[in-house]
Image (spheres, rainbow, N blue to C red):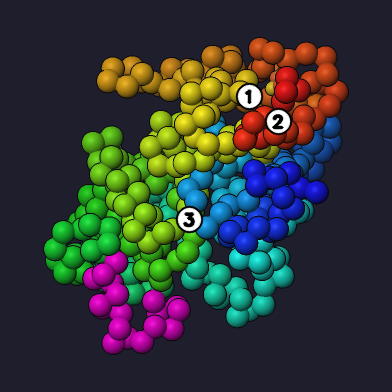
Amino acid sequence: MTMTMSGTMSGGKTDVLISVSEAKLHYKVGGALAAMRGKSTVVKAVDGVSFDIRHGESIGLLGESGCGKTSMGRLLLKLEPMTGGSVHFDGYDLSTLTKAQLRDFRSRAQLIFQNPFDAINPRFSIRATLAEPLENAGIAKSEREGLIIKALELVKLPHPLSFLDRYPHQLSGGQLQRVVMARALILQPQFVVADEPVSMLDVSVRAGVLNVFRDVRDRLGLTAIYISHDLALVRYVCERTIVMYLGRVMEDGRTEDIVREPLHPYTKALVAAVPVPHTDQSHAPLPIGRGAPDPRNPPSGCVFRDRCPAAHERCAAEVPQPKHVGDRLVACHLY
Ligand code: SF4
């Protein structure tokens, strides 16, 4: 049985839209030279992750760079081939979709890219940028202009008609990220993965873009995954947070509970590094010393143990499995 936040077999609840069970994404890296030196040539970007996402739920995938959160997001969108486990979307196993089911899935599940400057073809006008997904989905030409304008209105770009013939270099970063959002939303998806959507933007425009994201999500009743290394942003956007470290889930629970009383030692470190509101304090360094270990050679047992202030003998010998602690899941031998 796969332990998830719902505590049922994955996919067993009717309100579950997405069910992830023991998902794995392993990459081969380094090639023959690394193998000759005795280095492992496999990076376990996602390694046995399980959770359910209910209809309309917003979940933050949180962790430092290299924790596997972006890889997990890509597995949810079937943008990477899974090494093991399964992802079910609305009852369909993503690994066995027919062509017609895949086309349907592509319109119902969308990615909001991290970097708007890379996400959009600089040679396409905004009209052409937004027309592309409509054309791919077989929407008649006569209907496209109206849908494009609606999508630009949805992301609160004022005077949307004035944007249609402009090119990406004529837009600010904040405007361009709204166009990226409009393109992800134009086919009226049910589920979006937003991969650090404000991290490349100037601090002064981040709040505006985040507010648009929250507003659109609520108005459309979207199910959303928000990927970030920033707990303060996740707290602002998501009701539930899944903390990842080296490809595994460390803690999964309501965001407010996690912020107020983190249980896993890694989550405690993330919470301790959040800046105090209304001060100039930027993010403090994580109070757990050096960075994450080489993902090709993670520690035995608990992957967090060489940074964990509470590590003990059992942590080297045994991988901690997620356990219910109240209404949270925590993967740590302390519980
Ligand atoms: Fe720390 Fe051990 Fe818990 Fe891992 S299992 S977080 S090393 S106490």
Q: Residue 206 shows which numbered tag?
A: none
- Pointer 2: what residue? 331
Q: Earlier in the sequence, mark 3 or mark 1?
A: 3
Neighbor class of circle 3 (other Cα within 10 Å; few <14, some 14-19, many 20+) is: some
CB of mark 3 within 8 Å of CB of mark 2? no
Rendered position, 117 above or below 40: below
Mark 2 near ligand 1 (CB under 8 Å)? yes
Q: Earlier in the sequence, mark 2 or mark 1?
A: 1
Q: Relative to residue 30, is residue 147 depicted above or below?
A: below
Q: Is residue 251 visible?
A: yes
Q: Residues within 10 Å of mark 1 (few under 14, many from 20)?
A: many
What's the magenta region? 134-151
Q: Quadrant of residue 149?
A: bottom left
The residues tagged by marks 3 and 1 sit, at their Cα atoms, a distance apart of 27 Å
Q: Amino acid at mark 1?
A: His
**In contact (CB < 8 Å): disc 2 and disc 1:** yes
Amino acid type, mark 3: Gly
Residue 229, x across and y down, in percent: 48, 34
Q: Nearer the viewer, residue 176 or 12?
A: 12
Residue at image position (72%, 23%) is: 335
Residue 21 seen anywhere in this rendered image of the structure: no
Q: Is residue 276 left or right of residue 262?
A: left
Q: Position of residue 33 (x, y in %)?
A: 78, 38
**What's the mark number on residue 264?**
1
Depth check, mark 3 against mark 2: the one in front is: 3
Q: Quadrant of residue 161?
A: bottom left
Q: Which residue is mark 3?
A: 56
Could you tell which of marks 3 and 2 lies nearer the N-terminus?
Answer: 3
Numbered-mark total: 3
The crowding category of the residue bearing disc 2, from other C-alpha atoms within 10 Å (few below 14, some 14 to 19, many at least 20), is: many
Q: Is mark 1 within 8 Å of ligand 1?
A: yes
